[in-house]
Image: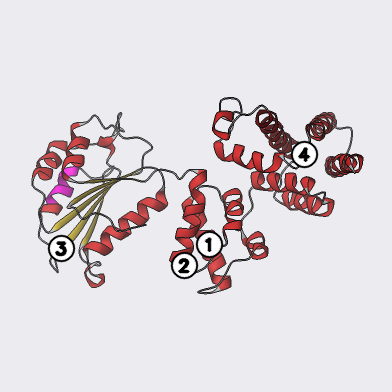
């Protein structure tokens, strides 16, 4: 993250708590010396205290030093439908303050909401007299950029070939991404390089990511890896029925992507036909070239039969799932042999 534009008033809004915290910290660092931060930062919960008290504090001279920071959390009056409180905010007091903010005060309002009402007079005043900093959730395609940003901050290196792994395992939660990368940084040390083996060992695993790995194990005809992944998921209390549905969903998207690609559709056009996130479609296009349509049809049939058997209770669930993995890989092997 680069330097934040200097202002007397800031509004941080959005649901990405990592970005809110990072921006807040940057403003504090840019505004106050470290030794002044303990005595010259005031915080107000605006669900508990009226805005007039924050304004009064903002207008009061710093206790020590030349500058102070006043932070107002949860400014509910910025919502289209504000929450009911035991008191009313005198928003006019804030409007009046914004006309002429105290030179020695930096005011930060933190609105951790998905949406705020930009039609309101108070929002327009904040936009006119201050800096608006959106802190919205990160998109899947931006995860790679954030891996690099956080890696630079932690003084480690993460090869670009591993970025997809982070996107699969951690997703778009930047706080979780930071936490996982701090774990890796402790292991490789400053200036160290994260290896695939270490990343796969240490990253917290999600069911969806493991579903993609199961797809890859079938793609690579690696039964041992597929069984190991399944056992790991069993330890996380993932049900074979749910995992079968997850695999079916992944292979269905791969199949749809392959058909549309053969018809000449570009990736961005596929969104009109495949009801999945663009990042999921991108991953499907990376995998579809490893399967023929015949293989994909056979795989979907096997998944449907296993799903039926699991729901009917005709076989012990874990055994049925392992047999299905064997058959999926066998389908791939048979097709490879018939082509050779």
The count of marks equals: 4
**Quadrant (top left/top right/bottom left/bottom right) for the C terminus:** top right
- Label 4 vs label 3: CA separation? 64 Å
What is the quadrant of residue 272 in the picture?
A: top right
The numbered dot on residue 67 is: 3
Q: Is residue 96 left or right of residue 263?
A: left
Q: Nearer the viewer, residue 273 or 128?
A: 273
Q: Badge 2 local density, few (<14 within 10 Å), some, or many (20+)? A: some
The numbered dot on residue 181 is: 1
Q: Answer with mark 4 or mark 3, whichever residue precedes in sequence.
A: 3
The numbered dot on residue 116 is: none
- Label 1 vs label 3: CA separation? 35 Å
Q: Where residue 188 sits: x, y (%)?
A: 57, 72
Q: Which residues are magenta?
A: 51-56
* Secondary structure that dominates the magenta span: helix
The residue wearing badge 2 is: 154
Q: Please give the name of the residue rendered at 17% of the width and 40% of the height, measured from the top-left corner.
A: 128
- Label 2 vs label 1: CA separation? 8 Å
**Quadrant (top left/top right/bottom left/bottom right) for the N terminus:** bottom left
Q: Secondary structure at mark 1?
A: helix
Position above or below: 33 against 251: below
Taking the image as drawn, is residue 90 in sight? no
Q: Answer with mark 2 or mark 1, whichever residue precedes in sequence.
A: 2
Q: Is residue 117 left or right of residue 311?
A: left
Q: Please give the name of the residue rendered at 22% of the width and 62% of the height, measured from the top-left corner.
A: 31
Q: Where residue 14 sits: x, y (%)?
A: 37, 42
């Amino acid at each position: 993250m680069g330097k934040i534009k200097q202002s007397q008033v800031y509004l941080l809004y959005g649901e990405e708590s990592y970005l809110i915290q990072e921006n807040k910290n940057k403003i504090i660092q840019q505004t106050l010396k470290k030794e002044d931060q303990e005595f010259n930062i005031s915080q107000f919960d605006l669900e508990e205290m009226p805005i007039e008290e924050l304004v009064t504090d903002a207008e009061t001279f710093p206790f020590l030093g030349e500058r102070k920071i006043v932070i107002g959390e949860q400014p509910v009056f910025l919502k289209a439908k504000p929450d009911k409180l035991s008191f009313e905010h005198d928003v006019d007091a804030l409007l009046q303050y914004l006309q002429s903010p105290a030179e020695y005060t930096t005011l930060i309002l933190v609105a951790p909401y998905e949406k705020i009402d930009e039609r309101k007079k108070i929002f327009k005043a904040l936009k006119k007299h201050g800096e608006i900093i959106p802190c919205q959730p990160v998109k899947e395609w931006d995860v790679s950029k954030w891996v690099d940003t956080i890696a630079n901050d932690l003084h480690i290196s993460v090869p670009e070939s591993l970025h997809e792994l982070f996107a699969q395992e951690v997703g778009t939660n930047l706080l979780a991404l930071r936490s996982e990368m701090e774990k890796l940084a402790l292991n490789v040390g400053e200036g160290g390089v994260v290896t695939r083996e270490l990343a796969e060992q240490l990253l917290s695993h999600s069911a969806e990511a493991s579903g993609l790995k199961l797809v890859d194990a079938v793609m690579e005809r690696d039964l041992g890896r597929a069984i190991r992944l399944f056992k790991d998921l069993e330890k996380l209390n993932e049900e074979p029925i749910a995992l079968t549905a997850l695999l079916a969903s992944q292979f269905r998207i791969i199949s749809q992507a392959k058909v549309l690609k053969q018809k000449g559709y570009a990736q961005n056009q596929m969104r009109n036909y495949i009801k999945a996130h663009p990042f999921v479609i991108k991953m499907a296009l990376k995998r579809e070239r490893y399967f023929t349509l015949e293989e994909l049809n056979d795989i979907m049939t096997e998944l449907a039969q296993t799903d039926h058997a699991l729901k009917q209770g005709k076989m012990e669930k874990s055994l049925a799932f392992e047999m299905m993995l064997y058959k999926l890989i066998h389908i791939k092997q048979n097709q490879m042999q018939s082509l050779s």
